[in-house]
Image (cartoon, grey):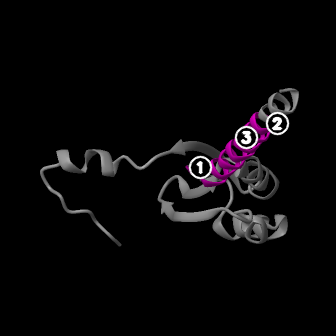
Amino acid sequence: MKNILFTALMMLFVINLSNAQAAAKENMENEKSEKLLLTIFLKHDQSMNLNEIEDIRNEQGFYKNFPPEGVSVVNWYVVMGIGQMVVLELPASKLKEVNLAIERTAWKAFRSEVYPTYDLYPIIEHKLGNKSKVSY
């Protein structure tokens, strides 16, 4: 009887352990797959001309270090009168690296503003009278 009880308890322990390992693996996979969009405004310092700004970016290694590895550029636009607007897609775990890349390589050339972003178009598309979506 003791052997049957011991065997049953061991089986429950093994089942619980394997379930816990599967749940931990699933959580790690979810963390890796959770991506966010980040909109960054790189506002020009209008006391400098474009060549001066470009020299600072090159000197600070902006082009070599931005965006960090594992971060994708969705869009990169010039916003006249403001500067540049960059939309990045990244795993949430890379947010710190993006922040550090901006602080280390863009701060003399630009003032920055950063906004978490999401794509609303799929949600409101059916409500719009004009269904066309511009693609450049």
Residue nearest the observer in this picture, 25 or 8 = 8
Closer to the chain start, of discs 2 and 3, is 2
Q: Main secondary structure of the magenta part?
A: helix
> Residue at position x 61%, y 43% from top?
113
Q: Name the residue under label 1.
A: 34
Instruction: Residue at 79% x, 59% y: name it.
Output: 105
The residue type indicated by label 2 comes to Thr
Q: Nearer the viewer, residue 78 or 31?
A: 31
Badge nearest the viewer, 2 or 3: 2
Q: Is residue 98 above or below residue 12?
A: below
Which contiguous range is marked in magenta?
Answer: 11-37
Q: Earlier in the sequence, mark 1 or mark 2?
A: 2
Residue beneath disc 3: 15
The picture places residue 68, in percent across and down from the top left corner, at: 74, 62
Q: Which residue is drawn at 56% across and 42% down?
A: 115
Which label sits on residue 84?
none
Residue behind mark 2: 7
Q: Residue furthest front?
A: 1
| Secondary structure at numbered mark 3 | helix
Label 1 – label 3 distance at C-alpha: 28 Å
Which quadrant is home to the C terminus? bottom left
Image: 84 above or below 135: above
Dot 1: element? loop
Is 125 located above or below residue 15 in the figure?
below
Q: Which kind of residue does numbered mark 3 sit on?
A: Ile
Which of label 1 and label 3 is nearer to you? 3
Furthest residue in direction left, as rendered: 129
